[in-house]
Structures are given as structure tokens and as C-alpha cells.
Image (cartoon, helix red, strand yellow):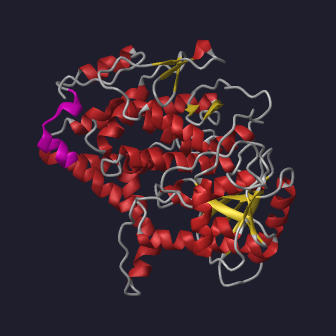
Amino acid sequence: MSNFQPCLPTCSSSSASSSSSYPQHPLSVEGEKWWMVERTANGIISSIRPDTYSEKTRMTGFKIIEKLFLKHLGIKVFQYGSVPLKTYLPDGDIDMSAITHRNTEDAVANNFYQILKAYEQNNCGFLITDVTMIDAQVKVVKCILDHIPVDISFNKVGGLSSLCFLEMVSKDIRRGHLFKQSIILIKAWCYYESRILGASYGLISTYALETMILHIINLFHSHLRGPLSVLYTFLEYYSSFDWERFGISLNGLIILEALPDVVVQRPQIEDDPLLGEDLIQRCKNYFSIPIRAVRAEGGQFKLKPINILDPLNDENNLGRSISLGNFYRIKSALSYGYQKLTEVLMLQESCISDGIKKFFVNTINRRRALEMENRVAACTKGRYYKVADLHGNCMSSFEGMIYGQYFLNYTLPFPRRPQNVRPGPAFLENNVEGNSIHLDIGGAAVENNDDRNKINIDNEASSSEIEEELTSMLSYITVTEKPCI
């Protein structure tokens, strides 16, 4: 551990001089001292991570929106993003995607905007305020539902795919939810302390930040003791990163001068990547089909001040939201954060806990303010809410991804399903018609079934029997090679 230094593409003279003034690398401090560091960080994470109260209120909000879509438009809506991944902050919004027919997104967005405006003006048992619509190339309907921000997009199946991918790699990493806890801690620093998170403001998007964190864990996993060591390595690595020559991918550095060809250079480190190539390829096979289907014609990786390769789509730059002006702001924030956290970690053991709390002072203060608004009111009713389990269930998201694929009639081979994933009631509810389950699987063929787009079922079969039969039939699906649209 004492020889650890994150491998940087370049290191500026100012950064090198500042780090050389410290007698030893912070990640090489004694085990007992670092245990205290991580324990303090875990206390901060526990205060801002999802709890049973916030889960309940967000699920209630989602159910309200879901019911409105079904009641007025007959459309299914699915969650994606930080809420189902269980990495949202106390101020985090709920991201949803409504699945509708192609080329009807604008009309559906306008209709649902009018529906929410009508509910905003009437007391219907729940509070809807600040209904707005972002009238851009991709329309987004926004509102505040019982004090929780809600963003509703349309046919954003890529968000469902990304959620499934992140959930799968988190389960592969394990180590006490290191990936998810690191996301929560680093998001808190980026949002509350440095104000560099938010794609709508020309800053880092959440998915881009998650990919940057995954890059750190994948390459430097053997030197990471907990979420705070991930944060420190994150700040050290990106504060002096050479963004003019390189971009970020899951397994290494993108050589920008080689684009449009994606050439990945492995940093000179001792350890092999934590995530194997076979896992990454399986994720692409499972989850990138809807993304490839909606890929823009003639699309390619477009250079921005910060370039981050989407793990599921080689043409998507996750840094596309970052403006040139904010690029310098982000670099400055990362450098300052690295300097201040280094100073904290080199404090005496008796002072280090207070130093970390001061490093997250805005996060702690915001949490206290929210307790005064929400948690105290809940406690007066005799309720006690504990931290939520970070284990996610990507089943509904996988169903949403497949449902979107079917509903939008993509002419694609059916993706092989991840292990232990079963089609649940939501899938069956929207695909059973009469005595057939509609699949629209394009180039796939189902064994012993003359109609490739249907699986015949018994009219008297129960839902559990249908689910079991569908699971069995899907295991026989043969994927044929067809060009993707």
C-alpha cells in the first residue's frame, strides 16, 4: 500500500508540487487511522443514503404518475436513474420514461403536460406544483410532486438499459456495495460541496459521474479501502487528468487523436481490471440493443472538453453536457477538493474525524435542514425509519427495456436474458392478449412455434403458470445475426 500512486496520463507541475509537500501518500496511512476515516465517511453516507421513508415517498410519487398515464393515455411508464439504483441524494428527483409509439413523443408530452396542469389547479389528494415542459429536441415534462422533483421523458429506453448495466456491475463488484456507496458520497461532494453536478446546467451528468467512478474502481480496486478512498483517488486522478489528449472509458484511456476509431490505452498499473471483458461484453449484449436501435443516423463520438465513453454505446459521449466555461470550473473544483482532502487526511488522528465532517459541511447542513422539514414530522407520528437496503432489483427495468423494444417494434434479434431474470406481472399484463403472448422478436425464432411473434397459452392458465411457461420458452430462443437499425 505504501507504494501506491494512481497512474495519471499527465501531472501538472502545480499538482505535483502540492502533493510533494506531504510526507507520505494519504492512502498509505496506518490501517487503524484509515479505519477511523472510513467510519466517519460511512456515518455521512448513512445520513444521506436512501431510507425506508424516502423510498416510500418516492414510490408513492411514481405510482401516482403511473396511474395518471394509464388512466388518461393508456401508456406504461418506468423508473430509471438514481431512485431504482438506490443512489439518490435527499434532494434527488425521480426520473421516469413513458413508452409510446414512435413519432408520437411530442404529442404525448403535450397531452400529459396539459393533464398535469389540470391536476395542478385542483386539489386531488396529492400536491402537484411547478408543472413545466422543456420544449427541446427531446421534450421533458417536469413537476414537483409532494415536494419531490419529477422528470418525465418519453421513449428513453437507453436510461433503462444503463440502469440494468449499473446494477449488474455493482453486484459483480460487491465489497459491501462499494460502488453504490461511493456514488452516494461522491455525488454529495459534487452536488453540495463543489456544485459541479447537473447536466441541465452544463455540468457533469449523473451517468457520466457514475462511469468516472466505475473507471476508478475498475482500475485501482486493490488499493481502495472504502468509499472515502474512492473519493480521494477520484479527486487525485481527475484533478490532473490530461483531457486534451485522453478521454475515459471503462477499461482505460481513449486516445482522442485516433477518433472516430475508439482506441483504448491501458494505464500502467500492476493490477488487472476488476471487471472482466466477458462481463462487459455480456452487458453490451444484454442491454445495448435498444440503444443501438435508436442511435442517430450517421452518429459518431463527438468531442467535448471532457470526453467519457458510454460503456454501452461507443458513439455516445457522456461528457456532451459540459460546456467549455464549466470545464475550467470543474477542473478547479477537483484540484481544490484534492488539496483540501489531502490536508484533512494528513491531520492527527484526534482531528481527522472533524476534518472530514468539515469537508462535507454543506452536505451535513442540508441533511439537517431536510430533517426539520420531513424527518421530524414523521417521527412525531411515532414512526421510525431506517436506512434502506442498497440491493437493487433491475427486473422491472429489464422488463421496461424489453417492453420498449417490443412496443417500438425494433427489428432486432432478441437479447439473451441475464441469469435469474424472470418475466414478471408487469411484462405479462402488457403482452398477453387473448390466448397469446406477443413478443415481436424480429429475427429470433421460438422452438416448436409456427408463429414467431406469439407464444400460445392455455386460456385456463394462471398468471404464475403463464410466467413459468414464458420463462421456459424464452430459454429456447435462438438469436440470429441481423443488422441493427
Q: Quadrant of residue 9?
A: top left
Does residue 232 appear left or right of residue 461 in this picture?
A: left
Vertical arrangement, residue 312 with respect to residue 75, above or below = above
Residue 394 pos. (x, y %) = 52, 57
Q: Look at the image and tell me whether residue 35 can be seen.
A: yes
Residue 354 pos. (x, y %) = 23, 50
Does residue 3 appear left or right of residue 86 in this picture?
A: left
Residue 158 pos. (x, y %) = 65, 46
Vertical arrangement, residue 9 with respect to residue 462, above or below = above
Residue shown at 52%/34% (left/top)? 281
Q: Quadrant of residue 186?
A: top left
Q: Dividing the image into 4 quarters, which one contains the N terminus? A: top left
The one nearer the camera, 92 or 22, is: 92
Q: Which secondary structure class fits the magenta region best?
A: helix
Magenta span of residues? 25-37
Q: Look at the image and tell me whether residue 424 can be seen.
A: no
Give the total number of marks visible in the rendering.
0
Vertical arrangement, residue 460 with respect to residue 115, above or below = below
Q: Quadrant of residue 300?
A: top right
Q: Dividing the image into 4 quarters, which one contains the C terminus? A: top right
The one nearer the camera, 14 or 6, is: 6
Residue 113 falls inside the magenta stretch: no
Residue shown at 65%/53% (left/top)? 401
Please, which residue is most extreme toward the bottom here? 381
Residue 258 pos. (x, y %) = 60, 13
Residue shown at 70%/34% (left/top)? 481
The one nearer the camera, 305 or 434, is: 434
Residue shown at 36%/39% (left/top)? 231
Does residue 103 appear left or right of residue 440 in this picture?
A: right
